[in-house]
Image: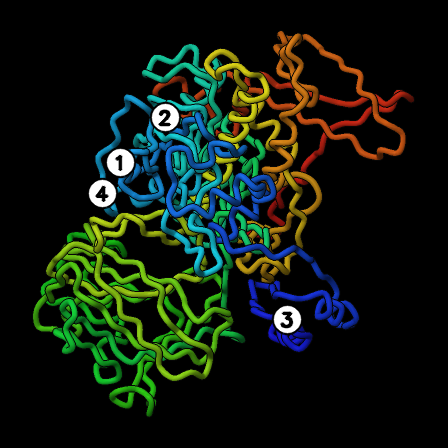
Amino acid sequence: MGDCKNIAIGCGGLRAEIDRNLVVSKHTKETLSCLEINQNIRHIDVSRESKPVNDKGRKAINIDVLQNNEAWKNALLMQQPTTNWLSDADYTGEGIVVGVYDSGILYNHSTFNEVAATGELVQRKLAGESKIECKFNDCEHGSHVAGIIGGNGWKSGSAANGRDNFLYRGVAPKVNFYANRMFVLHQKGNVVNHSHINDFSGLYEFNSYTMDYNLFYDWKNCEDECDSISKASIYAAANNGGLTPQYGNLLSYHSILANTKNSTVVGNMSSVTSVRNSTSSMGPTWDGRIKPDLMAPGSGAEFRFDENAPLVLLIDYFRMYHKNAETPFFELNFGTNDSLLNPDLRRKNCIYLSESPEQLIKCNLFREKFVGKLEYLDDALASNGKALKWTENRLSAQESYVNWRYELFSATPFEVQQDDEIEIRFRRISGKIDYPIINGSVYFSSEDDFYDGYETTSVRWILGKIGDDYQTTRFPWNGKSLVSNFLRFGFNYDYGIVSSVPCKQFEDEMSCYGESSGTSMAAPFVSGIAALMYQKFRTKTGLSLDKFSMRNSTVKAILIHTSIDMEDSQQAHVAYNSDISAAEHDGNLYYTPYGKGPDFATGWGRVDAESALGYIEDYDETSKSFSRFREFDISNGQEKNWSIYVPEGVHSLRATLVWDDAPGMRDDGNVPVVSSLDSKLINDLDMYFISPSGKFYFPWRLRPLPTNKGNH
């Protein structure tokens, strides 16, 4: 890939970056022709450059083209969002309510506020509803998710720097929000977003059953204080699709942790390359249904390393200062303490009743080491002549970190105050990260076992370019004050989606934006599109949504029907598929294939906002119907027929059938238990075409998952 990057640079390409097995670079027409005549370049995809927005997420879902007229352009030049901001524009989400079932929303953040004529701030929340009281990290995840759906991005950009003042705005920046915790009761809004899992085992349990029940009855029969209006339900697929599960033990195929039949389940793709993120959970469900349904941007670039191309960093020291101090109160110089490299050292008098790995690890002074290799190295550029050499060469590594107990470097636990400053010096020797920075975190914990309670601060480490001198990163500790028994720090090799986050060090200035990645970030992009679909439906019909609206299945059908199929090759993936490798049982590593048509890795493809919204046109007031989609009822054993005119010269015809199915039998002890492999479908609908000549055409049939070919 380095050779490919050099060719791009040699042709005049700018900002050339390697994203796994793809090279992304900026070109003019002239430099592009240089690539086209190079016999070593076999394929070129060209996309028009736009300004970086919400980490390119809005561009990836194709909504920017609709939010680009004069009304939008003028609004984005304003200094602040008034209550009339974007009032003369389309595709804003105004008047639509989105329920965010998560950790809560920090409504004090600027992105969820508008300015009234009196100068007062007006929070965009459902009228009459009390918000979940939260602050700081208590609702970081929910605030980030809500920002992607409909934050206005206030104070995230600067017109003086050639960017609009609302750079990191969400998909539908005029929606109102309803916030509640991560459950399926009390669902309110036109769209409900669930960026959380339902069950570690992927079973069809209470949450999936309850959601399907309410969607089947179109929210007219719920007994849990729902608002009884039609609404679309959007779920995150989970992040268990790679080699290491985030939750529970499921990984690779059969790792979907949102088993609801009727909700739209969303997987994670790169906002830059539109390639599936290797961590995105895959289907099928245990009873064979396709999941995820759709893909949306949940990450930026994804970097991986191996034995031939490792990431090698030299770390000079780790220091802590009191705020604005010049002399550190804590200093850890690397190269003089061999104990920091010894994973076998145990705590004195550490005795547990069992010798299980979970118990024994609590006795380790070197609590955790998730990095390929650590060693000391003589380095004349280091402050004390030695440095910690950090080598990441594990192909499957999505992050690297070390976690030390205080006894390895201190006689007593060390105290950390909020707003103390942390300083680390790095030097990059090798590693295909085409940015001068890398995401990471620092953790402290006052508990005897680290995971009984820890505090963390995210940071963007300054690495510089390969061969540069040491680069210093100094940043404030944003966690709580504590006396820590542990020091953990490390790096994350995914670049995420930028959205609103709390900023604890500036409690009176809530306007921080940060990165996060995963299917939790992909689902809200689809929820934002769904909000715009309801807004356009209301505009076209002229009726309020509590009187006439779209069912969940209609929204899902349009999103699936207009999605863009994701065809890819093995070479675009970095994390091998453990299920396929185990099934082939020949000692080789296999990657996740996804080809033409729907599949268990990417569902029906990546979401396309422009196309989805384009289907909500041509409304007939007499029949109360749209020309390009139909909602209808069908009885058991009944058959419905439609005649479709296909103009001459049109060589393809596409139809999508989606229904809100009745709830199936649950896989738990509250109702009669059934096998998780038994079908959960209650109503099994079929669809086929008959040509004028009488030829039958049937839907896609998916290739089955690989079966075991080995003898074991």
Residue 135 numbered mark, or none: 4
Q: Quadrant of the N terminus?
A: bottom right
* Residue 127 % position (x, y): 31, 23
Q: In this view, does 514 lie above or below 696?
A: below
Q: What residue type is labelled 2?
A: Val
Of label 1 and label 4, which has the lower sequence position?
1
The residues bearing labels 1 and 3 have C-alpha atoms spaced at a distance of 48 Å
Of label 4 and label 2, which has the lower sequence position?
4
Residue at the extreme right of the image, as rendered? 693
Mark 1 highlights which residue? 120
Please identify, in this view, whether the residue under mark 3 or under mark 2 is nearer the observer: 3
Mark 3 highlights which residue? 13
Q: What element carries label 3?
A: loop
- Residue at 26%, 87% in the rendered image: 383
Q: Which amino acid does label 1 sit on?
A: Glu
Q: Is mark 1 on a helix, strand or loop?
A: loop
The residues bearing labels 1 and 4 have C-alpha atoms spaced at a distance of 21 Å
Mark 2 highlights which residue? 184
Residue at the extreme front of the image, as rendered? 118
